Image (cartoon, rainbow, N blue to C red):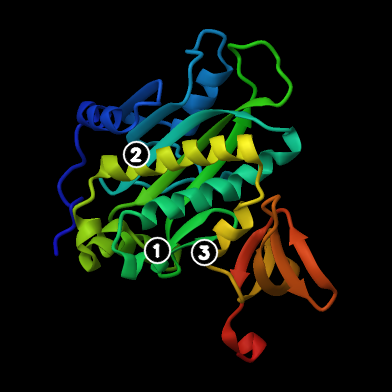
Amino acid sequence: MTSPFTPPLPAPAEMVSQLGAALPAFKQLRWVDSTESTNADLLALARSDHGPVARPWLLGAHLQERGRGRAGRSWQNRAGANLMFSCAFDVFLPSRQLPTLSPLVGLAASEALRSLISPPLQSHISMKWPNDVQWRFAKLAGILVETTRAGTSPFTPDHYVAIIGMGINLDDARALSQSLNRRVADWSEIAREDHLAASTSAAMIVARIAQAWYDSLNEVTAYGFESMPDRYAKVDALAGQHIHVLDNGRILQAGIACGIDTEGHLLVRTPDGEIPIHVGEVSVRPREEHGA
């Protein structure tokens, strides 16, 4: 089956037209041929005293010259091979809860992508804490969450603007796997297995994820994060796995992953009990290390 993304992506104006029809709640929709970073662009706009007040916003680009991932990593991309966009949302949360947005938007994106493929294959879309989206345990998409104060409104406690950026591999997984020396997945791989994925447009993927973020942020603002552990359990790529939690290559913790708490912390079962992990990179331990 030929991937639906083998031809060039729709022109920016056409992307905006399709997104506008699917996202009526979004106050500003833009798609450009190229920019340095969609997250950086929306951060600057949010901090400006002259930017539009009404949100949410969405900005996408066929190419990001300085795209960024978590922990300051660069995002490798090629025009037409990646789907890259950022959204800006008003959030009304205490500052201590802002880090919880990272796993929240990862699981919302995973749920959204599952809804675009046939039910028998949906479980192959999963999330690796804190927010990597995977297909058959290979990275399909990465997410970066940044928060700032709005420049266009007076200081209000607990009012922030969350900028959520996402890059989804549409093609090039084989080349990326070789260059990064780890398995990478892309949407064309899914489309070859599934007729629903093959018939899904790029604009629909973006719209479904953006709407899922919007709905999830509204839900936690109204009701809190109590439902997040149960939602996460349904997409959890690490459940029951023996893992190492790393910081700059140094092992901070080792144990068995057992979900998240309502603050979005990864829970790791160790001989000393269950430990919540706030930050760190997760590495699944090879089977021979733990005798499985």
Observer able to see residue 48: yes
Query: Which residue is at the front of the view, 206 or 231?
Result: 231
Say which element carries label 3: loop
Q: Report x, y in % for residue 133.
A: 46, 57
Query: Which disc, if any, is residue 184?
Result: 1
Q: Which residue is mark 3?
A: 234
Which labelled disc corresponds to residue 207?
2
Q: Disc 1 residue type?
A: Val
Label located before the other in sequence (1 or 3)? 1
**Mark 1, mark 3: which one is toward the viewer?**
3
User: In the figure, residue 23 lies in which quadrant?
Assistant: top left
- Spot occupied by residue 215 in the image (x, y as percentages of width and height): 48, 38
Compared with residue 262, is residue 79 higher up or lower down, i.e. above or below?
above
Q: Which residue occupies 31% across, 28% down? A: 31
Identify the residue shown where x is 65% and y is 46%.
225
Which residue is at the far front?
A: 223
- Residue 250 visible within the image: no
